[in-house]
Image (cartoon, rainbow, N blue to C red):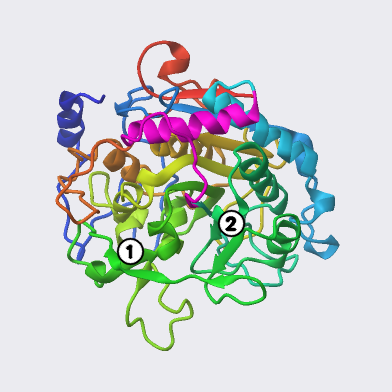
Amino acid sequence: MIRREFLKGTLAAGALRTLPSLAHPPAGRNAGAAQPGAQPAQWSHAEPPNRPMGTARGIYPGRVVWVHDPGVASWDGDPQSGGWYEDRFVDAARAEAMLRETLRRVTGAKSDAAAWERLFEDHNRRHGRGDAGYQPGEKVVVKLNLNCCQRRVSPTQGYYNTPQLTQALFRQLVRQAGVRQEDLVVVDASRFVPDSIFDPCHAEFPGIRFEDRDGGEGRFRTLPDMDRAIAFANPDAPDLDTTYLPQCLTGATYQVNAAVLKGHSLAGVTLCVKNHFGSVYREDTGPNDPHRGWNPAHLHRSITTPRRPLGSYNAMVDLMGHPDIGDKTILYLLDALYAAPHQSRLPEKWQSAPFDGDWTASVFASQDPVAIESVAVDLFAAEPGSRHMVGAVDNYLHEAALAHEPPSGTCYAPAGNGAVLQSQGVHEHWNDPERKQYTRNLGTGGGIELVKV
């Protein structure tokens, strides 16, 4: 865990500040002191490398598994020749093998079925339910990131969950974990489940329930649970006391957070925790709201990294620690067969090692929500094409790792019952972009263990 003396030292150096007023947020680190409108410098982290903070989670605490197979993705990058999501540009067998290897490495199991059994049993054990696994009748939600999706996708469609890896995940849950199809719910409340995912998956698993913003064409409309508000810690932003979650989340026993690897114009990155910006509902957003209430715009100010300093409140911590989100998640998964520099952009090839001018062609998984995002942030920081990595990009990871005593001084208690969040996981930065080693790799501490396959 990070030392209080280190926090004091960085505070004295100006890296951490008290929680600012939302009305006049100061510029973040590396946000650039130049004239208004100047392009901020690319982000670099403030604390030394291999200085873990927070408490690692998981069967193997702090473990993040990264499987890389350059042969899985073969799109030529030209929308005129077709979309990146098509079967001819994603090797489905390789994607399925990557997911299988990831699951086994996260849990230390020798079979897929044993891997899921360990995930469910570990989750139930930590929640006081003994060594029980999944039981028929318990709902399992898979949260996808379908940002910018329409029903019929086009070759110019921005990046979302690859249909091939998504279908492989459903095969794992049904055939290996033994989850009944009628107990599986796939959702992105603010967007649409595209035909590219729905058609093949529904044909193979007709009992799985797909929910999205409007429903129809075999999908169901996502409904908010108006009895389950999120108690955001910052009272200054509008509608924070009337922001709700989907009924499918509040009624589930387990969740798999299946996110994607993308940059973001406000937050720098959009990974697993920001995936749930597609899970928040507000009343009375007006007749012109294109998202029909499933609109997280009121949270954007707290995550805008160029304007928010290290040591400030971040709404993503409230989402990460909410009992219907983080407390129900058995696995955090990053679909990085491709990666996009922006939430609405097409995938782009990466120049940094080991990609070397090719697609990212990767799958990441962890039981620790802070650790997996810390690794992804380090990867984005090492990639010269990461145009939105500016400001205090890892501020939310500091706040989440130290949620019980965050640098901002915020009291994170999103359940609304007075229960203050404890550490949500472990955060640190690797030693350097070439070796990519964390303290558990080096044997020097209790931080992250990056297992590269």
Indicate yes or no whether the magenta region holds residue 133: yes
Q: Is the residue marked by circle 1 packed among few (<14), some (14-19), or many (20+) residues within 10 Å?
A: many
Residue 182's tag is 2
Q: Secondary structure at mark 2?
A: helix
Indicate yes or no whether the magenta region holds residue 147: no
Quadrant of residue 448 within the rendered picture:
top left
Q: Residue furthest bottom?
A: 287
Q: Which residues are magenta?
A: 111-139
> Can residue 368 be seen in the rendering of this structure?
yes
Residue 315 percent location from the top left of the image: 30, 55
**Dot 2 or dot 1, earlier in sequence:** 2
Name above or below for residue 121 compared with residue 175.
above
Instruction: Locate the N terminus by quadrant.
Output: top left
Residue at image mark 1? 299
> Can residue 184 be seen in the rendering of this structure?
no
Of tags 2 and 1, the one toward the viewer is 2
Residue 120 percent location from the top left of the image: 47, 35
The residue drawn where x is 45% and y is 13% is: 442
Q: Amino acid at mark 1?
A: Leu
The residue drawn where x is 58% and y is 56% is: 182
Front one among 381 and 148: 148
CA–CA distance in space, label 2 to label 1: 33 Å
